[in-house]
Image (cartoon, rainbow, N blue to C red):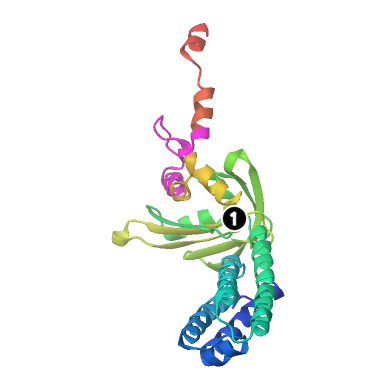
């Protein structure tokens, strides 16, 4: 269970679980307590809602930013209100009181869900990618090159710089969608020399980002197999991610290109470039490259 969540979300999560257990254990009694007849139809509905309440509660408690689970629980509250408004009641006063209680729970569900959605720049939408490559160099050499984090911009085209702060923390600067520069600090959370390096952005960073890279002997003594996994929340949320894809800056493509450049840098000491090899498959980079090339008229004048 997540421990760094807002106390309001924790309270809602536990309330949902307790309510769900009550609905499962005594559906008929609970139905009568809120003014319903408590017949088989109402009992079945209570049991169904009990299961959904428990699922919502577990989801809220298990996630650090459970906006989607809070909204799901809000949907259940609205369903309860609709049932109570239309159901045949044994006591309209009790049913009205139950509707007021449900409405009272619905409000914090919605407010907390909205607050957590605003707190997450991506609206809860994370991007995860995984790519691998084989480099014809010893495992220790490949690891040492990556472990010097300031080498990363040499092959990760969208990184402007990585500055080491100390042995575990570093400051990253990258090109964001629309040409924006974004900065954040990250820390190494796990390290096994020549085998594994894992990192994540520090709390409060403008880019929520984590990753790992694994190094292992490639089959047939062909060098080192490098496997990279990245998870991040795109700057600008889902709209920013869509814009990035429209301009060819799709995360899986980016990472595949980055590993291709890593292979070239380590094996050959430089990145091979050609007219058909666009930097990062980025339309903007291609246009800049074309704009910098002299036209035939300019060549003639020279």
Residue nearest the viewer, comparing 27 with 232 = 27
Which residue of the protein is positioned furthest toward the left in this rendering? 220
Local crowd size for mark 1, using a 10 Å CA cut-off: few (<14), some (14–19), many (≥20): many
Magenta stretch, main secondary structure class: helix
Question: Where's residue 45, x and y in %?
Answer: 49, 81
Question: Where's residue 84, x and y in %?
Answer: 58, 77
Q: Residue placed at 47% from the left, 37% from the top?
A: 279
Residue nearest the viewer, comparing 283 with 105 = 105
Q: Is residue 6 above or below residue 93?
A: above
Q: Residue placed at 51% from the left, 11% from the top?
A: 298
Q: Confirm whether residue 167 shows in the render.
A: no
Residue nearest the viewer, comparing 86 with 78 = 86
Q: Confirm whether residue 139 shows in the render.
A: yes
Callout 1 secondary element: loop
Q: Quadrant of residue 131?
A: bottom left
Question: Where's residue 256, x and y in %?
Answer: 42, 49
Whether 263 is among the magenta residues is yes
Q: Is residue 254 above or below residue 86?
A: above
Q: Quadrant of the N terminus?
A: bottom right
Horizontally, residue 299 falls left or right of residue 65, namely left
Residue nearest the viewer, comparing 238 with 280 = 238
Task: Point out the stretch of residues depicted in magenta.
Answer: 256-285
Whether 273 is among the magenta residues is yes
Q: Is residue 49 above or below residue 152?
A: below
Q: Residue placed at 66% from the left, 54% from the top?
A: 206
Q: How many marks?
A: 1
Question: Where's residue 25, x and y in %?
Answer: 53, 92
Residue that mark 1 sits on:
122
């Amino acid at each position: 269970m997540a421990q760094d969540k807002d106390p309001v979300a924790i309270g809602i999560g536990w309330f949902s679980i307790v309510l769900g257990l009550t609905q499962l254990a005594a559906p008929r009694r609970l139905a009568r307590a809120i003014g319903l007849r408590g017949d088989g139809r109402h009992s079945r509905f209570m049991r169904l809602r009990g299961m959904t309440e428990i699922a919502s509660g577990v989801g809220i408690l298990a996630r650090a930013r459970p906006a989607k689970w809070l909204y799901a629980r809000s949907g259940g509250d609205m369903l309860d209100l609709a049932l109570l408004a239309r159901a045949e009641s044994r006591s309209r006063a009790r049913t009205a009181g139950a509707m007021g209680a449900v409405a009272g729970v619905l409000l914090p569900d919605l407010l907390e869900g909205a607050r957590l959605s605003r707190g997450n720049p991506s609206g809860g939408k994370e991007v995860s990618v995984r790519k691998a490559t084989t480099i014809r160099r010893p495992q220790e050499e490949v690891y040492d090159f990556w472990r010097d984090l300031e080498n990363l911009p040499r092959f990760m085209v969208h990184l402007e710089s990585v500055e080491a702060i100390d042995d575990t923390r570093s400051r990253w600067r990258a090109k964001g969608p629309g040409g924006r520069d974004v900065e954040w600090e990250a820390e190494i959370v796990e390290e096994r020399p020549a085998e594994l390096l894992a990192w994540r952005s520090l709390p409060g960073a403008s880019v929520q980002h984590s990753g790992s890279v694994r190094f292992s002997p490639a089959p047939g003594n062909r060098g080192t197999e490098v496997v990279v996994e990245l998870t991040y929340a795109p700057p600008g949320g889902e709209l920013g991610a869509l814009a990035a894809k429209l301009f060819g800056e799709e995360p899986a493509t980016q990472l595949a290109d980055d590993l291709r450049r890593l292979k070239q840098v380590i094996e050959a000491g430089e990145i091979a470039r050609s007219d058909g090899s666009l930097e990062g498959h980025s339309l903007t980079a291609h246009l800049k490259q074309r704009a910098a090339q002299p036209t035939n008229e300019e060549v003639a004048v020279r």
